[in-house]
Image (cartoon, rainbow, N blue to C red):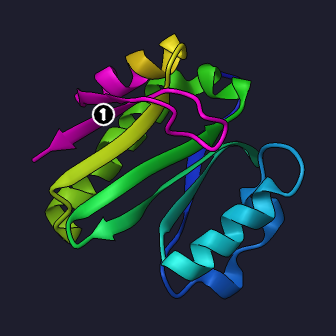
């Protein structure tokens, strides 16, 4: 890794501080959609950087008290700091459980994405099921969860 890995937290109440350029990784108006969703749902959003170069955004959205849906968008550069990124995400999950009362984390993984299947398993999540034609593109997904 050439630079230093660090992250910024945007939490409920910080919406006015969030700029699309802070959370944008992707194409089209994805950053604007994430920002709009963040402002509406009060999600916790983290931007992970190497030096000042964004390499990932991730966060969770509350489905119910204590239950969150994890999401992330990463660039290829996240591999440069894989261990640091993994430790960061694991520490977020622990912090969420201990300080916020989150007892269930869940995420969906599109069928055929072997790296993401390994990532979910690395986060100590268990596959709870297969969802046929779940996505907006009618793709198949697995649902993974970690329950404390």
x then y, percent, for residue 78? 63, 28
Q: Nearer the viewer, residue 89 or 7?
A: 89
Judge whether residue 84 can be spotted in this image.
no
Quarter assignment of residue 30: bottom right
Q: Nearer the viewer, residue 61 or 51?
A: 61
Q: What residue sits 41% from the left and 23% below the top?
A: 119
Question: Residue at label 1?
Answer: 144
Q: What residue sits 57% from the left and 26% below the top?
A: 81
x then y, percent, for residue 42? 49, 78
Q: Secondary structure at mark 1?
A: strand
x then y, percent, for residue 117? 41, 19
x then y, percent, for residue 147? 14, 44
Relative to 2, 59 lies left or right: left
Dot 1, how many residues are within 10 Å of its Cα: few (below 14), some (14-19), or many (20+)?
A: many
Q: What residue sits 70% from the left and 75% below the top?
A: 18
Relative to 106, 94 lies left or right: left
Quarter assignment of residue 86: top left
Work out whether 126 lies above or below 90.
above
Work out whether 129 lies above or below 59.
above
Q: Residue furthest right?
A: 28
Question: Magenta span covers which residues?
Answer: 119-148
Work out whether 25 lies above or below 110.
below
Indicate yes or no whether the magenta region holds residue 146.
yes
């Amino acid at each position: 890794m050439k630079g230093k890995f660090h992250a910024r937290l945007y939490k409920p109440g910080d919406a006015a501080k969030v700029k699309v350029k802070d959370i944008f990784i992707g194409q089209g108006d994805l950053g604007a959609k994430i920002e709009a969703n963040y402002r509406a749902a009060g999600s916790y959003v983290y931007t992970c950087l190497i030096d000042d170069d964004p390499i990932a955004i991730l966060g969770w959205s509350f489905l119910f008290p204590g239950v969150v849906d994890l999401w992330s968008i990463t660039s290829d550069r996240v591999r440069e700091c894989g261990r640091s990124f993994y430790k960061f995400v694991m520490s977020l999950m622990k912090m969420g459980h201990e300080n916020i009362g989150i007892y269930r984390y869940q995420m969906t993984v599109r069928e055929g994405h072997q790296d993401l299947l390994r990532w979910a398993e690395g986060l100590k999540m268990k596959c709870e099921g297969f969802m046929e034609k779940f996505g907006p593109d009618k793709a198949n997904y697995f649902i993974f969860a970690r329950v404390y």
